[in-house]
Image (tube, grey):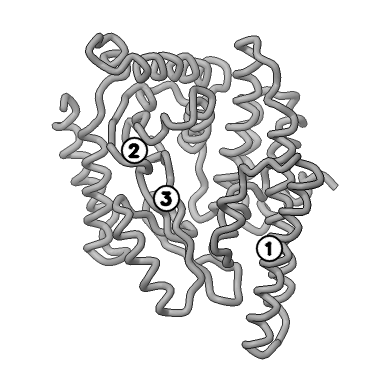
Amino acid sequence: MMFRPVVRSSIGALLLLLGGCSSLDYYSQLAGGQLSLLQAREPVAEVIADPTRDPKLREHLAQSQRARAFASEHLHLPDNRSYRLYADIKRPYVVWNVFATPEFSLTPQQHCFPIAGCVAYRGYYNQGAARGEAALQKQQGMDVYIGGVEAYSTLGWFDDPIISSMLTWGDERLATLIFHELAHQRFYVKDDTEFNESYANFVEQEGTRQWRTARGLPPAKVNEVAQKDQFIELVLNTRARLQQLYAQALPVEQMRERKAQEFQRLRDEYHQMQASQWAGDKRYDAWINGPLNNAKLLPFGLYDQWVPAFAALFKQVNGDWPSFFKAVERLGGLPVDERTAALRKLMPG
C-alpha cells in the first residue's frame, strides 16, 4: 500500500480526463478497476526477497526482471518503474474487452477516450459487466465477441505492474508481454488501433527473438511460428472474403446464408490444414470450434495487419532500434491516409 497517496491524486486526475465521453457508470468502473490495480502494487524486488512468498512466483518474477532490463538496455524501450512492480489481482484477466460489429460489416463499433483516443472495443474489469454489455449489443442485432486481456498499458500515466494474469504462460510469454506493453509507452498514436497494435506486436516478436539470442537459446520452433502465421493468414483471408460479400447488395436472408458459408469454409480449411500440415496439432481448436462471427475476427485485423510493414521498416534501418523508433514516430505523425499509404508501400509483395 506504499503507493496509496499517489494513487488517490492520480485517480482524481483520471476521472477528470475521462469525464464527458460516456456514461458515469462505465467510467466509474474504469476508475475503480484502475484504482484497485494500483493499490495492489508492490515492488518486485521485495517479493523476490521475501522467503515467505511462493518460490515459483519469486523465480518467475526474477526471470521477468532480466527481461525488463533487456527491454531498456537493448531494445531501447522506456526505463521507468513499469513492470518493476507486481500486483496480484486474483482473476485470470485484468480486463475483458467487448468487440461489436454490425451483422453485415467488419467495421468495429468505436469508443473514444481522451487519453487513448478511439479504440475498437470497450473494456470491463468485471467479466459479468462485460457479458452484460455483450448481451445489450446482441439485442441490438450486433455481432459480439468478448476477449480476456492479460495486460494493458496506461501509456506512461501510471507505473504499470506485472499483473498475476501475466504469469500463466511461462517466462518467455511474460517477457513478450513486457516488450509489447512498453512499446505502447514508447510510442502511441491516438485513434489508430491497427497501427498501434501492429507496431507493438512487431516489437514483441523481434524483441523476443533477440531475447532468445541473448540467452543463447535457439530460435522459436519453426513449426509453432509457421502454424501461427498460417492460422492468422487463414482468418485474414476469411475477413477479405467477407468484406467483398458485405459490399454486395443482397437480400438479408441470402446475405446470412452466404455469411454462414464463409465461416463454415474457415472451419473446413482449418481442419484440412491441421490434418495435412500440422500433424493434428489442436492448439487453435477451441477458438475455431466456438461460435464464429464478425466481431471474433476483429482482433486479428487489429493486431496483425501491419506487422510485415514494421518488419520491413526495421530492416530498412539495419535493425537499429533508435532509428526504427524515429521512423515509427515519423509514420505516426502523418495524416491517417498518408500513414496508411506508407504502410501499404512497406508491405511485402
Real-space Cα separation, disc 3 to disc 1, in angstroms: 26 Å
Q: Which mark is residue 116?
A: 3
In this figure, which residue is indicated by the disc labeled 1?
239
- Select label 3 or label 1 by which is in front: 1
Q: Could you tell me which secondary element the residue under label 3 belongs to?
A: loop
Residue 292 in the image: above or below residue 61: below
Real-space Cα separation, disc 2 to disc 3, in angstroms: 11 Å
Query: Which one is earlier in the sequence, the residue at label 1 or at label 2?
Result: 2
In this figure, which residue is indicated by the disc labeled 2?
157
The quadrant where residue 267 appears? bottom right
Query: Which one is earlier in the sequence, the residue at label 3 or at label 1?
Result: 3
Q: Look at 37% across and 17% down and name the residue there.
A: 56
Q: Could you tell me which secondary element the residue under label 1 belongs to?
A: helix
Residue type marked 2: Trp
Asked whether residue 309 appears in the rendered view, the answer is: no
Residue type marked 3: Ala
Q: Could you tell me which secondary element the residue under label 2 belongs to?
A: loop
Judge by depth and name the residue closer to the eye, 266 or 216: 266
Residue type marked 1: Arg
What is the x, y in percent for residue 157?
34, 38
Residue situated furthest right in the rendering? 349
